[in-house]
Image: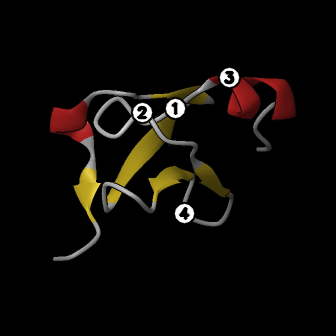
Amino acid sequence: MSLDVRLLEILVCPSSRMPLRYDEAAQELISESAGLAYPIRDGVPVMLIDEARDLSA
């Protein structure tokens, strides 16, 4: 499942307020600046810091 490019242009990381990168294989939105990966469930990005995966772990 692909993410709408327009949606990706609008969304920012709730922690850092920086742009996100879409990882299609993992179905996640990656925030390089915050070191977090936000899951995409059933095509819907879950933009909650508590639900994000820590990339440093």
x and y, in percent, of residue 12 in the image: 52, 32
**Of label 4 and label 2, which has the lower sequence position?**
2
Against 41, residue 25 (above or below) is below
Going by the numbered disc 1, the residue's amino acid type is Val
Q: Nearer the viewer, mark 4 or mark 2?
A: 2
Give the CA distance from mark 4 to mark 3. 20 Å
x and y, in percent, of residue 5 in the image: 84, 34
Q: Which mark is residue 17?
A: 2
Q: Which mark is residue 12?
A: 1
Q: Name the residue nearer the viewer: 31 or 47.
A: 31
**Of label 2 and label 3, which has the lower sequence position?**
3
| Element at label 4 | loop
| Element at label 2 | loop
x and y, in percent, of residue 38 in the image: 40, 44
Dots 1, 2 in contact, CB < 8 A: yes
Going by the numbered disc 3, the residue's amino acid type is Ile
Residue name at image x 54 percent, y 63 percent: 26
The residue at which mark 4 appears reads as 26
Dots 4, 2 in contact, CB < 8 A: no
Give the CA distance from mark 2 to mark 3. 11 Å
